[in-house]
Image: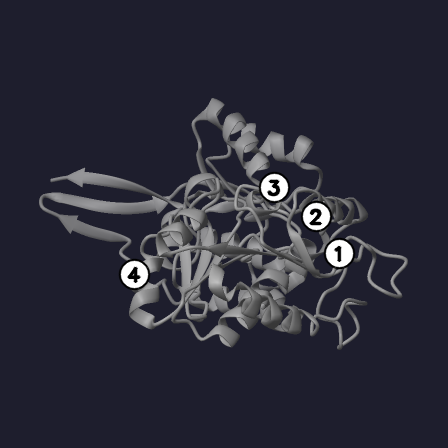
Amino acid sequence: MSRTAQVGFPAAVVESVAGLADDFAWTEEVGNSLIVREPIGVVGAITPWNFPLQQIVSKLAPALLAGNTMVFKPSENAPLTARLLADAAAEAGVPAGVFNIVYGTGAVVGEAISAHPDIDMISFTGSTRAGQRISAVAAATAKRVALELGGKGANIILDDADLPTAVTTGVMMAFANGGQVCGAWPRMLVPASRQDEVVALAVEAAKQYTVGDPNDEATRVGPMASEAHRQKVVGYIERGSADGARLVFGGPQRPEGLTVGAYVQPTIFADVDPSSAIAQEEIFGPVLTIIPYADEEEAVAIANGTMYGLTSGVFGEPEHALAVARRLRVGQVDVNAGHWNPLAPFGGYKQSGNGREFGRFGLDEFLETKSIQR
């Protein structure tokens, strides 16, 4: 995870953004108008702790290519990556004053950046609640606000899916990075008649997710980001059982042999009510909810039935799965485990935010558009 995602993804993003420079439509002719795309100015960027390098690079690379400067606030829970990147940027020749870091909490530094009249745009990744606050504060200066917020992705497994692949991939997409991923798939939607089969496959796959020291090569799930976050995740696991979901793997107890540290057992619930808290709210931990559906119409309704709309997956016969993917109110859908594409747009519908990252779509976010009539 550290090598492929935490380091590999940011490197891929930088390479993909650099590749846009020569072919991007910086100017174009529309009738008697010259359309010019110009830097928006000073970008205020605020990022979370779960992908500390990826989140910075996804904003910094297109912002710089667009000609902007940046005032950046990293998460107070993971601040050091930003300093390492700033050192690398300075060594690469980025002029002083172009990439600036201000450390602190969201309530202090985040608010100041969002409200500042000399900052022309806010690009934020984080919780929906924080995004709502940033939007409210930024409204006083009518600055542009791009938000990539929470998610509650659904993995829809259709009747004609390759079940072992669909379930194994779905478990990975629920437990990766300890489930601390906005684009995770914590909901697995399955035909009711095949739920028992799916549960057996999911439990078998979950056994491979060893919990432990992240420095140990055998570990697949490290600790949560903090003890407070561990307690939040455990609270949801306890709530799931209290609300009547069937616990089939894991549970609220600490993993065996790990009495110290913010560790949580990877946990799976079956027979989950789609309206329950564990199926509606972003847990941000290694908790998978298996939700049975009666037919395809119900599956789509359940998948679309949260306030979020960031990512989802669909498994089934390719054309069938594509038709279902088109019906989902989310910003990104993977059909049969389609590969991540750093040139494709990423962002949310509904309360998962607005705006897009990556590729030309992400570059557009950091530009103003001017028309000159002649």
Label 4: few (<14), some (14–19) or many (≥20) C-alpha neighbours in 10 Å:
few
Where does label 1 land, which residue?
251
Most distant residue in the top direction: 140
Q: Percent position (x, y) of residue 271?
A: 58, 54
Q: Which residue is mark 3?
A: 277
Q: CA distance from mark 3 to mark 1?
A: 16 Å
x and y percentages locating residue 368 in the rendered image: 34, 41
Q: Earlier in the sequence, mark 2 or mark 3?
A: 2
The amino acid at mark 1 is Gly
Where residue 2 sits, quadrant-wise, is bottom right
Query: Tags 2 and 1 in contact by the CB under 8 Å rule?
Result: yes
Mark nearer the viewer, 2 or 4: 2
Look at mark 4 in the image and give the residue it sits on: 323
CA gap between label 2 and label 3 equals 11 Å
Q: Are marks 3 and 1 in contact (CB under 8 Å)?
A: no
Q: Quadrant of the C terminus?
A: top left
Q: CA distance from mark 3 to mark 4?
A: 29 Å
The answer to whether the residue labelled 3 contacts the one labelled 4, judged by CB atoms less than 8 Å apart, is no
Task: Tell me which amino acid carries mark 3.
Answer: Ala
> Which amino acid, mark 2?
Ser
Give the residue number, with chain letter if any, for mark 2. 241
The Cα atoms of the two marked residues, 2 and 4, are separated by: 35 Å
